[in-house]
Image (cartoon, grey):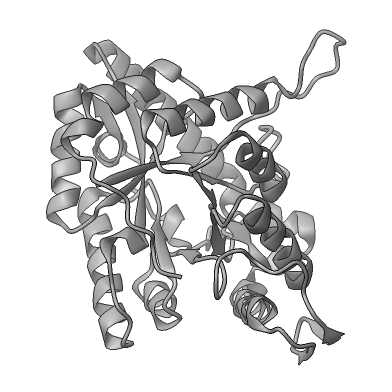
Amino acid sequence: MQFGLFGAAQAQRGGAPDVDSAAGFKDYIEYVIEAEALGYQSVFVVEHHFTGFGQVSATLNFLTWIGARTRTLRLGTAVMVLPWHNPVLLAEQAATVDLLSGGRLDFGIGKGYRHNEFVGFKVPMEEAGPRFEEAIDIITQAWTSNERFSFQGKYWQFDDIVVEPPTAQKPHPPFWQGAGHPDSIRKVAARGHNLLLDQFASLEETGKRFQTYRDAMAENGFAFHPSMVGAARAFFVTRTQDEKEAAVDRRIAAQRRLHAISQRPDGNNKASIMAYSDTRDASEESAMYGTPDEIAAKLETLRSMGIEYVLLNGGGTSRDNLRRFAKEIMPAFRTEPERAAG
């Protein structure tokens, strides 16, 4: 198995002269630098807007800084929400990160699911799907065309352009798509893209989604390797039952806070990431909280399903948690990394 990180920093909104709003970002960068030294192979950073939580919004800028401070760590986006971005500008910015990092970018993309973000950008949620597909076509052409090209779509039109700089990875950085519904997963496989699975689904549901993708890749004539699926999981290595209970409490509170800003006023947000069961048992089952033996048992379950790439969300910058997982759990599971397909 291979292990990466998933998540992001938070910046404290200041006001007082003694408040360092960048402290959370700086702490997370140091956390990621130590993760590389401990043997974690990647970091996938989210993109979110208008939360009031101080989450990372300029993801590629953030990864550029991480890339300059690391040497081997894969730099992932999880995910860039394409309906909000000019796809040509995004292709240029992502190519710059890939070039400067020596070909370490994993380009994770998605349609978006939080209602408040679509409202803020004044993009109808109903347009998310077609905007997303059109943007993929443009970015792919931008990265693979050495000649000038034009594009005339419903949402974007470009005339006589060539995207610079070139990417370091050829034909382009690997695409990773976040998806959960079976039809969405099949669309990922139809393009031959890699798959990101969310951290809220149960172990059983995660296994079903993995199988759907593996079967669909074969149906579309693409080679498959387990490294093409990254399964996100919250993790916390605890010493006592009280620590575990407190961690579950924090997880439930965070889930409900995110649900409040993500749900549509009509309650009709059907995104797969919104479909988790809002119970304590479900939250505890989907997360890797507990002793090293308890976490190892869940990893064994994932491995028995074929999942070999786990992206760990520590919910902050606890170095002790990061170190304990690396030293007490990772050695029993970790194998040498294989590059995921493009």
Q: Is residue 238 above or below residue 308?
A: above
Q: Residue at the spot x=34%, y=26% of the render? A: 248
Side of 27 relative to 215 (left or right): right
Q: Residue 103: in sight, yes or no? A: yes
Q: Residue at the spot x=68%, y=60% of the render? A: 94
Q: Is residue 292 above or below residue 260?
A: above
* Res. 90 image quadrant: bottom right
Q: Nearer the viewer, residue 172 or 182?
A: 172
Q: Is residue 221 above or below residue 66?
A: below
Q: Residue at the spot x=48%, y=63% of the render? A: 176
Q: Residue 49: in sight, yes or no? A: no
Side of 290 relative to 230 (left or right): left
Q: Residue at the spot x=70%, y=67% of the render? A: 91
Side of 178 relative to 230 (left or right): right
Position of residue 63 measured from the top left corner of the image (x, y, whole percent): 64, 44
Q: Nearer the viewer, residue 55 or 218?
A: 218
* Res. 84 image quadrant: bottom right
Position of residue 292 measured from the top left corner of the image (x, y, whole percent): 19, 24
Q: Nearer the viewer, residue 272 or 327?
A: 327
Side of 15 relative to 147 (left or right): right
Position of residue 160 measured from the top left corner of the image (x, y, whole percent): 86, 88
